[in-house]
């Protein structure tokens, strides 16, 4: 803790308390499983790309995400996690019915962020996902980029650059589709699906676990602070493109309302 409070990096398992190690592994598994599940989810879009340039673009994004997953799994192996066994244990291709609303729940036992359980079915889905989820992940990964675990922080430098390119791809296409009368309704409908799902990924505000992450230097901001930074950026862009964002109500507020209804 003295090292962390002094702004120094933790470099090896030998320097870690068990509490630090467990929480570090938990966060890194979420990223690793999400990277791999995301890659598998993008694969069908290779055949749905509108031209050869975009076929290559999607294939490149798939390759990037698989590489990110392998980088994260290697870091986890260094911490004693058997990642080959984990790879065999979970089905990262698993997707729920596209009409299901998971809220903030997971659909299986892997650690992926739950938005990766939803299927991408159309090109507009892929673009809205690029625009919303990749941007949301970027806001979250800023904390990993500056985290107290040195190997993870350094690995994030390359990952963050490639994720930024994915976000740029989505932004370019949302603008293009918004300006095309034949595609405008389609991209608006896709944003209506993917924006609320992305807002759910950040977690509840002011949780004890998030406070612990910040104490350990594994995160820098509260969940809701990250969510609001994302929402502000997306709102400004969407308004520039002449589109709108749907209303979003936190999953935990819905649960509270249901619990308050008699009978």
Image: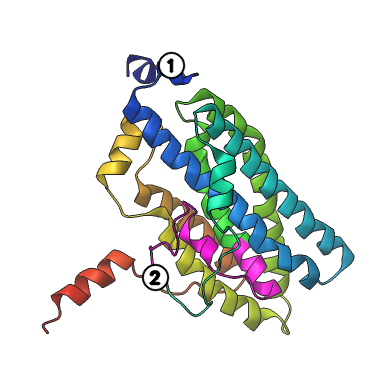
Q: Position of residue 106 (x, y in %)?
A: 42, 61
Please tell me in which quadrant of the rendered image residue 51 appears.
bottom right
Name which residue lies at 71% across and 61% down. 172
Dot 2 crowding, Cα within 10 Å, few <14, some 14–19, many 20+: few
Which residue is painted at 80% across and 70% down in the image? 47
Q: Can residue 216 be seen in this snapshot?
A: no
Residue 76, image x and y in percent? 53, 34
- Give the secondary structure at mark 2: loop
Residue 126: say if magenta. Answer: yes
- The residue at 41%/70% (across/down) is 102
Left or right: where 87 falls relative to 197: right
Q: Position of residue 127 (x, y in %)?
A: 66, 66
Residue 218 as seen in the image, left or right of residue 53: left
Label 1: few (<14), some (14–19) or many (≥20) C-alpha neighbours in 10 Å: few
Q: Which residue is mark 1?
A: 14
The span picked out in magenta is 102-129
């Amino acid at each position: 803790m003295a090292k962390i409070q002094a702004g120094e990096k933790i470099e090896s398992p030998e320097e870690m308390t068990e509490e630090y190690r467990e929480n570090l592994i938990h966060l890194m598994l979420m990223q690793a499983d999400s990277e791999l599940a995301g890659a598998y989810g993008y694969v069908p879009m290779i055949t749905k790309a509108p031209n050869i340039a975009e076929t290559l673009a999607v294939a490149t994004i798939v390759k990037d995400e698989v590489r990110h997953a392998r980088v994260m799994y290697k870091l986890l192996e260094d911490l004693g996690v058997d990642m080959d066994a984990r790879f065999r244990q979970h089905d990262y291709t698993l997707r729920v019915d596209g009409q299901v609303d998971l809220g903030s729940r997971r659909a299986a036992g892997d650690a992926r962020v739950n938005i990766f359980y939803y299927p991408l079915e159309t090109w507009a889905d892929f673009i809205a996902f690029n625009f919303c989820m990749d941007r949301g992940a970027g806001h979250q990964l800023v904390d990993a980029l500056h985290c107290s675990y040195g190997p993870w922080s350094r690995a994030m430098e390359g990952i963050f650059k490639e994720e930024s390119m994915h976000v740029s791809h989505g932004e370019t296409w949302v603008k293009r589709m918004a300006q095309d009368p034949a595609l405008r309704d389609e991209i608006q409908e896709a944003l209506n699906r993917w924006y609320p799902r992305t807002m759910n990924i950040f977690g509840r505000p002011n949780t004890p676990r998030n406070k612990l992450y910040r104490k350990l230097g594994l995160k820098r901001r509260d969940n809701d602070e990250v969510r609001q930074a994302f929402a502000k950026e997306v709102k400004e862009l969407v308004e520039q493109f002449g589109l709108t964002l749907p209303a979003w109500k936190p999953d935990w507020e819905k649960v509270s309302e249901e619990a308050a209804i008699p009978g």
